[in-house]
Amino acid sequence: MRLVTTDAIVLRTYNLAESDRIVVCLTRSAGLIRGVAKGARRMKSRFGAALEPFTLIRLAFHEKENRELVAISSADILKSHFALNLKPEVVEVLAYMGELINEFAPPHEADERLFRMLAACVEVLASTNQAQRQLTRYFEIWLLRLAGLFPDLRACTGCGLELTDLVPTFVDAELNAYCTDCRDPQAVSNLSPQVLKLIRATYQLSPVNFVQKHTLTDQEDAIISGLTHRLIARTIERRPRTLVAATR
Ligand SMILES: [Zn+2]
């Protein structure tokens, strides 16, 4: 048995037996883990409120070889976000992020950048109003990029021409990007210069800076979400269950 101590973000919990909980967390040093928190449902549980979804915690757990479930020994709150749970549209965005992390993050495989990205997005949701849509697009683009599943928009696959955000770019079903001359008539996404600027801004800015500096028109949002949702559905081979009004 190995004891691991790491920062973690609680994604969801569900009940197990009479007094325990299963906790799904994205951890900084061990990636996605599922663990049993013994006695977590008792009134005077040692876990207190630390296992509320999207709380940032210092987590300690024991890993057993060949066991998928770890045994959680302690969870201390580093930052709680009680206010997040008061706004239904924020809860929807969090549920969506949680579902996608659960699908995309390989179990027990650390991804520091994914951890930091999720933590930063949760911070934005906790501190600003009405940024859910921009933030959700930001999150989707980064989730796909970190998984190597976002199209490379630097050069045309056909002729090698550098793709700038001055001319439209076309992306086909295989994630190849093309210039106007080489475009495949079957291209599924037509990215206008303004949409390309927005996508490139997500590469360069932190989530808080992105939502402060950029708003999305309905049309821009529809084009970007058309691309991200197609790529997500293709990866998880279904439509996310939590894809509802706030995240669309
Ligand atoms: Zn070309």
Image (cartoon, helix red, strand yellow):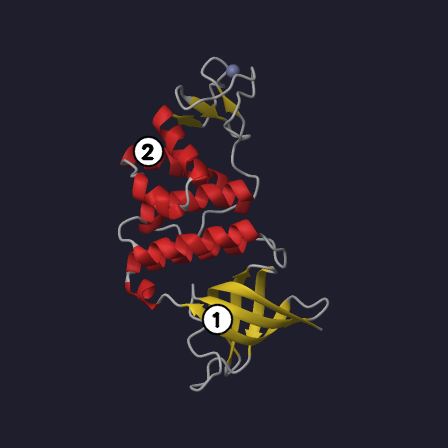
Looking at the image, residue 48 lies above or below residue 226? below
| Picture residue at 52% right of the left edge, 16% below the top | 161
Q: Nearer the viewer, mark 2 or mark 1?
A: 2
Badge 2: residue crowd in 10 Å (few <14, some 14–19, many ≥20): some
Could one spot residue 106 in this view of the protein? Answer: yes
Q: CA distance from mark 2 to mark 1?
A: 37 Å
Indicate the position of residue 78 as horizontal and vertical percent values.
Answer: 45, 68
Q: Quadrant of residue 148?
A: top right
Which residue ends up furthest to the top in the rendered image? 181
Amino acid carrying label 2: it is Glu
Say whether residue 58 is left or right of residue 71. Answer: left
Identify the image quadrant of the C terminus.
top left
Q: Quadrant of residue 159?
A: top right
Residue type beneath disc 1: Tyr
Give the mark nearer the N terminus: 2 vs 1. Answer: 1
Q: Secondary structure at mark 1?
A: strand
- Location of the N terminus (image quadrant): bottom right
The correct choice, above or below, for 147 with respect to 28 in the image is above
Mark number for residue 220? 2
Q: Note whether 84 is above or below 228 in the view shown.
A: below
* Of the pair 206 and 216, the residue shown nearer to us: 206
Give the residue pinned by disc 1. Answer: 14
Quick one: SS at disc 2?
helix
Q: Is residue 233 visible?
A: no
Q: Nearer the viewer, residue 28 or 147?
A: 28
Residue 136, x across and y down, in percent: 38, 47
Whole-percent x, y for residue 113 in the image: 53, 49
Q: In the rendered view, does 227 fall on the left or right side of 91? A: right
